[in-house]
Image: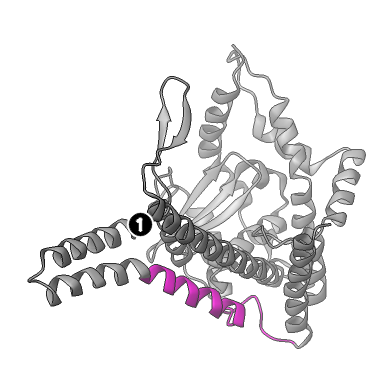
């Protein structure tokens, strides 16, 4: 293990231990906004990064106003304003096909019940995914979208579905930085800064290869190198802090989900997620010639819900051996299981048996079939 890996491992363990300490002290973690020092550090750094385009543009305006008699100063001011405009991050827009409330009223009814139980803002839309995954994304103050993987949904029991939905909604109440608009803007601004510090990248049509067009003088190259190195170091540090904060947010979302769906349901959900590679194997082993429909999502779901013992044991053993790293938004599943077990929420706050799952599956079926057809069109064998 390299020294950097050792640092990642210790940093990751420290985050898990801090959450376990909060749990042992009966703090209300997972159901309220996180106010840890790590969260404040990431938020403050994000605000500073996002403000840099405005600072650069403001500097340009000051030059124009104060030195308006100088053509050089005016030119420099206009350049700074243009740079500030370039550095701004484009708005994070929802461009995917989205289920709305009229499309699936029963699904959104359950989402509303979970949001009310967790004191979270309501979900505005759902993205249907073709993989074993789920996510929460905030595109604006009025558009919160939950991504729902069809194969994962089909592989879960009712209580586990509640745990899945509650986990993603939990990210709304703990304000996970990896899913927020502020961190998206900060990462975008850093990317624009990095573009400015590098020569333009072009495409060689003859060889279809990329290359950098470098026509700057030595001084410009040295300045670009120093500036680029500083920006790269800042980006790496910011991403490390953001990943660390996001891992803490994963633990908090797990705790919130366990309080709503119960420890048993959340634990089983995590154990099924360990088996997600089996669903991918089932997908890659599917051959489609276009002659008849294949229920590939059901096939992927069965690979998770009813795996062979040999493959399941191998994946579980691998998951239990996985070391903790801070270059990923998700901590190792074995640590997440430790945190859920330590909190203990044996009785679910919502009874999954009272929910109309057949009705929800009926509402989702048309959207699942549409996504399934799109997936099959990608793997069709000519």
Per the image, label 1 sits on a secondary structure element best described as: loop
Image coordinates of residue 223 in percent, x first then y, are 42, 59
Whether 81 is among the magenta residues is: no
Which residue in the protein does label 1 denote?
A: 91
Can you say whether 36 is above or below 131 in the image? below
x and y percentages locating residue 219 in the rendered image: 39, 55
Give the percent coordinates (x, y) of residue 290: 58, 15
Highlighted magenta segment, given as a residue range: 26-51
Quarter placement of the N terminus:
bottom right
Please name the residue shown 61% across and 54% down the image: 356
Return the residue nearer the eye: 98 or 40: 40
Quadrant in the picture for residue 176: bottom right
* Quadrant, the C terminus: top right
In the image, 6 versus 163, the foreground residue is 6
Is 33 inside the magenta-drawn segment? Answer: yes
The residue depicted at 71 percent of the width and 36 percent of the height is 280
Q: Which of 202 and 113 is in front in this view?
A: 202
| Residue 179 in view in this figure | no
């Amino acid at each position: 293990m390299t020294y950097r890996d050792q640092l990642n491992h210790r940093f990751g363990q420290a985050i898990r231990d801090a959450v376990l300490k909060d749990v042992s002290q009966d703090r209300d973690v997972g159901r309220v906004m996180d106010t840890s020092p790590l969260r404040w550090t990431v938020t403050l750094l994000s605000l500073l990064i996002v403000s840099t385009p405005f600072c650069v543009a403001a500097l340009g305006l000051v030059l124009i106003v104060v030195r308006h008699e100088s053509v050089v100063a005016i030119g420099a001011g206009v350049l700074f304003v243009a740079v500030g405009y370039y550095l701004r991050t484009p708005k994070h827009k929802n461009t995917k096909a989205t289920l709305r409330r009229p499309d699936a009223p029963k699904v959104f009814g359950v989402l509303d019940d979970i949001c009310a139980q967790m004191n979270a803002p309501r979900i505005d839309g759902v993205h249907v995914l073709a993989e074993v995954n789920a996510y929460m994304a905030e595109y604006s103050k009025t558009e919160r979208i939950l991504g729902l993987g069809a194969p994962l949904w089909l592989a879960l029991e009712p209580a586990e579905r509640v745990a899945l939905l509650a986990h993603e909604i939990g990210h709304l109440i703990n304000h996970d930085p990896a899913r927020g608009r502020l961190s998206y803007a900060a990462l975008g601004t850093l990317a624009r800064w990095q573009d400015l510090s590098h020569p333009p990248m072009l495409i060689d049509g003859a060889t279809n290869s990329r290359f950098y067009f470098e026509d700057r003088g030595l001084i410009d190259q040295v300045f670009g190198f120093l500036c680029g190195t500083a920006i790269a170091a800042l980006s790496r540090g910011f991403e490390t802090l953001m990943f660390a904060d996001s891992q803490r947010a994963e633990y908090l979302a797990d705790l919130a989900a366990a309080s709503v769906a119960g420890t048993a349901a959340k634990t089983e959900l995590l154990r099924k997620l360990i088996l997600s590679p089996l669903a991918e194997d089932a997908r890659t082993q599917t051959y489609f010639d276009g002659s008849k429909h294949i229920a590939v999502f059901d096939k992927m779901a069965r690979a998770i819900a009813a795996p062979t013992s040999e493959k399941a044991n191998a994946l579980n053993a691998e998951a239990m051996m996985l070391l903790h790293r801070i270059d990923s938004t998700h901590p190792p599943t074995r640590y997440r299981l430790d945190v859920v077990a330590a909190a203990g929420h044996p009785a679910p706050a919502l009874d999954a048996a009272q929910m109309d799952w057949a009705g929800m599956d009926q509402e989702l079926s048309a959207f699942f079939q549409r996504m399934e057809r799109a997936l099959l069109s990608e793997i069709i064998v000519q």
